[in-house]
Image: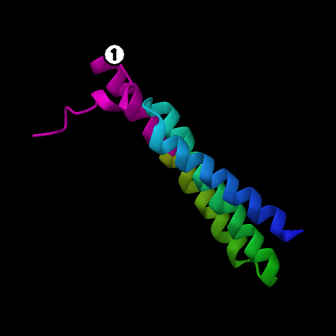
Amino acid sequence: MLTHYLVLAFLLFSIGAFGVLTRRNAIAILMAIELMLNASNIALVTFSRLHGNLGGQLFAFFTITITVAEVAVGLAIVVLIYRLRKTVNADEMDFLKG
């Protein structure tokens, strides 16, 4: 039964990695990063359950709370860039270059 969760985590992480590498929209990239982080949380909880210790579940809980803050900051940055550039295309976000 635990292998099913690990396969699910692998598939979610693969879909997220594919999304990060192929998407141009900054919001879609943030969503793909979310998928990757959720996949790692599933793997953490699975291994925690396998070994019978709560350390992995506690770490996954803290990871989820940090991820929420990361998403809030990331979306705020994307909204600010949209207000300045009128686009959220990742290829056009080069204004930080020297």
Residue at 48%, 48% (x, y): give it: 70
Residue at 48%, 44% (x, y): give it: 20
Type of colouring: rainbow
- Report the number of numbered marks: 1
Relative to 48, say whether 38 is above or below: above
Quadrant for residue 31, please give it: top right
Which of the pair 44/76 is nearer the observer?
44
Instruction: Assess whether residue 81 is covered by the magenta stretch.
Output: yes
Quarter of the picture containing the N terminus is: bottom right
Q: Main secondary structure of the magenta part?
A: helix
Quarter of the picture containing the C terminus is: top left
Which of the pair 91/55 is nearer the observer?
91
Left/right of residue 42 with respect to residue 68 in the rendered view: right
Which of the pair 65/33 is nearer the observer?
33
Residue at 62%, 54% (x, y): give it: 13
SS for dot 1: loop
Write down the region rendered in magenta. 71-98
Residue at image mark 1: 86
